[in-house]
């Protein structure tokens, strides 16, 4: 056993010696004869192969733009569709492109970041790369919108990370023009633009527990009036008639639905779409694919064209016969994939399509509607052969208190003939998110190594209705954790999982669930991988960064219970740091991404607790020569270590 110093408390990191990639593959094949020679793909195929992300189409439909990694930094490219020619618009180096937007047909404006810092300023470039404007603004800035009527201007938020209530500016791309577009009165933390890019609706900052207040104005010259929406009602987008707002609401309903809301009369103005079994929460989340926000508008017809949302897989409801025809045409040409609209040119004659499924990372296409011609462009990840991947199967099973839990089960190639299998359960982060059907590189990576992978949408996961969501109230570390345990017990009872070979792997809130599973049910798990979790709730809620991370996690303190103040015993009971001595197996701790070169405090707290309890653990990337410092590692290094760590534990 290798031990390395963990200063300054003179702790020792108790860990196993990592297996080499060769030995890992040898071990995997030895215990799973279904993994024939050459079928185990390198980690690079899954995690370095996304050559095209955030793909968009220019307003005239002649170009695409996209982001791609070059020498470790994200760069901006264009692709001329007719000539099939690529052009790199930025240079690789310390700076990387965090985000971008089209500004008319000719220019792209992009947001610069450097290493762990993002939003360092904006730059612009012509789509042919022949002219660059490196300082649209040198101030930290966030892109808000591009304005079609002003193709050489963009709307930006300046100093969004320093000012609590920043103004909205219009900034020139090729000039030094800058003006305040919307002056923040000092209490607005969110705004909505109408279809003509005018600020019509703003949200006023409120304290936790206070009812949210908004302000609305019929025109930019009229005074603001305050509005409070009905409970459980959330604004989505303004209609072409700016007095009408699309909202998602759960008021007096078991599932969220989309309605129109009249801002003048302050009343609901009609149902748009509901689903009898699932929340209609518009939006796509396709792992690096830029998509509509779920409400798909047609500028040509000047109306809402459709709504995209999730059931057990992606759904779309079209309201215009024209778009139904377009969808049918694409589905007939691509019958084996989910075919998603990513955008169109301004004429709505050329459509950018993304086609994917659970075994295929996806391909990009252009549909020329007048000629009814569908043109393949490129694959999102050419390193993946879909025929070598495996299906993600929706599953249901009961919780101990009678709820129906939904999840996804992915078995390795030939897995049905090898049951029961070593299992990795992957609780999702959030917590108020959900796992979705589709290509998941982490899941396929693990299945490619011979593991069954189980994902469960535990109570509090979004999309399954109000009652299921609220069932998580006061249940962090308790019934939410029981759902993870019940999922594993279901897999064991159905002879899917070998009870002696089960690992738990989570990130964010999923890392908390992983570690809490290790200490609350140590007999169930042989090991855990925890990436950037919270392990001591009491200290976290008292920390300076708590409000920022709570907002990121959509986590309200009320989710711990109705009376949190003074409940230190409760917080200790559900915190792995205070129960580390119960951990029954080795733990791989991976610090929070974005923590820079410093070991984040929550990972350190857990490491100290595990050390004191004499438990086996390892901190990935720890610099043994410096106190609390991390080595600079690549994503491939992380997944290579995860692979060998799991193999050491359950193969």
Image (tube, grey):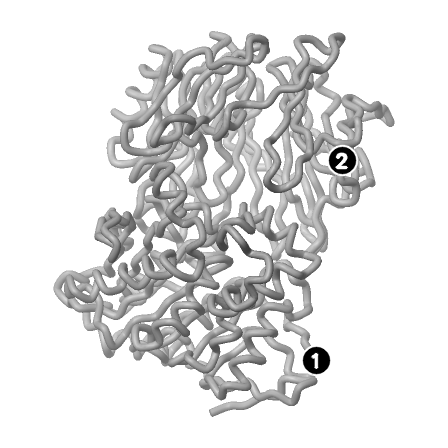
Q: Residue at x 41, y 71 (%)?
A: 528
Residue 12 placement (x, y as % from top left): 57, 88
Quadrant for the C terminus, please.
Answer: bottom left
Residue 443 placement (x, y as % from top left): 35, 57
Q: Residue at x 87, y 27 (%)?
A: 176
Tag 2 secondary structure: loop
Of labels 2 and 1, the one closer to you: 2
Mark closer to the chain start, 2 or 1? 2
Residue 333 placement (x, y as % from top left): 28, 27
Residue wearing tag 2: 165
In this orientation, which residue lies closer to the viewer: 534 or 353?
534
Numbered badge on residue 627: 1
In this orientation, which residue lies closer to the viewer: 479 or 431?
479
In this orientation, which residue lies closer to the viewer: 75 or 328?
328
The furthest residue to the left:
417
Q: Residue at x 49, y 80 (%)?
A: 617
**Is residue 365 in view from this perspective?**
no
- Residue 235: image quadrant is top right
């Amino acid at each position: 056993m290798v031990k390395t110093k963990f200063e300054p408390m003179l702790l020792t990191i108790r860990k196993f010696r990592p297996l080499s990639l060769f030995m890992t593959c040898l071990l995997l094949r030895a215990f799973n004869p279904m993994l024939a020679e050459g079928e185990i793909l390198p980690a690079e195929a899954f995690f370095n192969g996304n050559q095209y992300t955030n793909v968009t189409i220019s307003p005239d439909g002649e170009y695409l733009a996209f982001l791609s990694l070059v020498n470790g930094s994200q760069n901006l490219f264009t692709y001329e569709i007719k000539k099939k020619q690529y052009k790199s618009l930025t240079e690789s180096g310390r700076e990387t492109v965090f985000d971008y937007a089209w500004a008319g047909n000719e220019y792209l404006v992009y947001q610069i970041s450097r290493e762990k810092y993002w939003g360092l300023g904006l730059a612009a470039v012509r789509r042919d790369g022949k002219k660059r404007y490196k300082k649209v603004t040198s101030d930290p800035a966030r892109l808000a919108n591009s304005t079609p009527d002003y193709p050489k201007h963009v709307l930006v938020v300046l100093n969004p990370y320093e000012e609590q209530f920043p103004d909205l500016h219009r900034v020139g791309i090729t000039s030094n023009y800058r003006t305040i577009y919307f002056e923040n009165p000092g209490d607005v933390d969110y705004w909505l633009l109408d279809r003509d890019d005018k600020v019509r609706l703003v949200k006023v900052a409120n304290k936790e527990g206070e009812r949210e207040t908004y302000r609305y104005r019929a025109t930019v010259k009229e005074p603001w009036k305050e509005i409070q929406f009905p409970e459980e009602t959330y604004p989505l987008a303004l209609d072409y008639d700016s007095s009408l707002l699309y909202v998602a609401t759960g008021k007096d309903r078991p599932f969220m639905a989309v309605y129109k809301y009249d801002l003048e009369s302050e009343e609901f103005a009609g149902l748009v779409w509901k689903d009898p079994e699932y929340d209609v929460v518009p939006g796509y989340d396709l792992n690096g694919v830029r998509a509509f926000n779920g409400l798909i508008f047609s500028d040509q017809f000047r109306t809402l064209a459709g709504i995209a949302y999730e059931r057990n897989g992606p759904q779309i409801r079209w309201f215009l016969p024209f778009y139904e025809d377009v969808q049918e045409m694409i589905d007939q040409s691509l019958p084996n994939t989910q075919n998603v609209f990513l955008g169109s040119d301004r004429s709505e004659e050329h459509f950018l399509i993304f086609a994917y499924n659970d075994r295929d990372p996806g391909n990009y296409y252009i549909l020329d509607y007048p000629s009814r011609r569908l043109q393949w462009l490129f694959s999102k990840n050419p390193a993946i052969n879909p025929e070598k991947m495996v299906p993600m199967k929706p599953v249901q099973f009961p919780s101990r208190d009678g709820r129906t839990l939904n999840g996804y089960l992915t078995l390795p190639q030939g897995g049905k003939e090898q049951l029961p299998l070593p299992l990795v359960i992957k609780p999702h982060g959030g917590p108020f998110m959900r796992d979705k059907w589709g290509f998941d590189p982490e899941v396929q990576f693990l299945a490619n190594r011979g593991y069954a992978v189980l994902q469960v949408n535990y109570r509090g996961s979004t999309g399954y209705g109000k009652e299921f969501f609220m069932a998580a109230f006061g249940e962090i570390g308790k019934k939410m954790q029981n759902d993870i345990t019940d999922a594993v017990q279901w897999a064991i009872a159905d002879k899917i999982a070998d009870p002696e070979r089960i690992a738990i792997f989570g990130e964010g809130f999923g890392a908390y669930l992983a570690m809490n599973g290790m200490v609350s049910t140590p007999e169930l798990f042989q090991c855990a991988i925890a990436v950037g979790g919270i392990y001591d709730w009491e200290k976290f809620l008292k920390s300076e960064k708590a409000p920022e991370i709570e907002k990121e996690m959509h986590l309200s303190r009320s989710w711990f219970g109705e009376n949190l103040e003074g409940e230190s015993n409760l917080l200790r009971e559900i915190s792995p740091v205070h129960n580390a001595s119960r951990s029954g197996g080795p733990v791989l701790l991976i610090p929070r991404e974005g923590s820079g070169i410093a070991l984040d405090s929550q990972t350190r707290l857990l490491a100290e607790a595990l050390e004191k309890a004499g438990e086996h653990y390892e901190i990935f990337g720890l610099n043994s020569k410096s106190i609390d410092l991390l080595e600079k590692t690549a994503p491939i290094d992380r997944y290579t270590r995860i692979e060998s760590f799991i193999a050491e534990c359950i193969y």
